[in-house]
Amino acid sequence: MRRVKVLALISSILIMVATIISWVITQDVNITLALLTLASTIATVIMAVTIYELDIAIKELNFETVSTIYEMIDDTLKKQIQEIKSWRSQGISIEDFLEDQRKRKIVKEASKTLNRIGYFVYREFIGEWFIQEQYAGLILDSYLAMLPYLKAFRDSSECKKRSLNEKEVDICKKSPWFIRRFYLLLVVISYHYFCKNFPAQCKAIFNSYKLEPKNPVPEQWLENDVKRWLKRRGYL
């Protein structure tokens, strides 16, 4: 898009310069208008070709991103989500989770993968509609299953610093997330789409965790840039 804007600016400047030079040299309105028409036609053709090339490049980028996302949401991620869901039914406590390095690694890797996908959406490498239509249910289910462990993982990573006193730690736990902020973005857009279009399935997912169907991401957890992105698109 920047390339098109630069080209448009350069073309307009060249047309203006050519028109002035033609008028200065010929002092003939007809010649000047003819030259202006020719220059405008050439500029229009160049712009059309550039926009066409840009459109092809964007489609290629989107195709590559879609392929990457299909590769990321593979059987490994799905197995990780299933195992995390089993912890809830087994009653694995937060304390047990934090002491188990294997479990911490599973939550870290699964949420990291989903956070990367959220970044692709945030940067508009892929439209949010694709994620919503293909994976909204999976993302919402993964988050509800992972939430208590993910929150503990995030708090231990961002708030357990020696330089923070007890009050500051409490404030940090309620502050916007950093390490998984794009995963939260993904959850918000998935919730809005899934629960609006498939209310029965949405209610079933929430009921499986003994929760009421409502946005599961507190607004205070959302980082400012993420919050602005969601507000621009009507999710907040």
Image: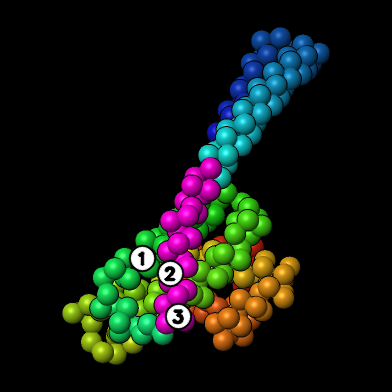
Q: In the visual, does 177 lie left or right of 192?
A: left
SS for callout 1: helix
Rendered image quadrant of residue 132: bottom right
Label number found at residue 88: 3
Gap between marks 3 and 1, in whole Å?
14 Å
> Residue 158 lies in what quarter of the image?
bottom left
Work out which quarter of the rendered image holds the N terminus and state it.
top right
Q: Nearer the viewer, residue 158 or 34?
A: 158
Residue 106: mark in rendering: 1
x%, y% of residue 121? 54, 54
N-terminal of the two: label 2 or label 1?
2
Q: Residue furthest right?
A: 30
In the displayed structure, 204 sits above or below 22; it is below
Magenta-tinted stretch: 67-90
Q: Which mark is residue 83?
A: 2
Disc 3 is placed on an element classified as helix
Q: CA distance from mark 3 to mark 2?
A: 9 Å
Give residue 139's position: percent from left, percent from top: 55, 65
**Is residue 96 magenta-colored?**
no
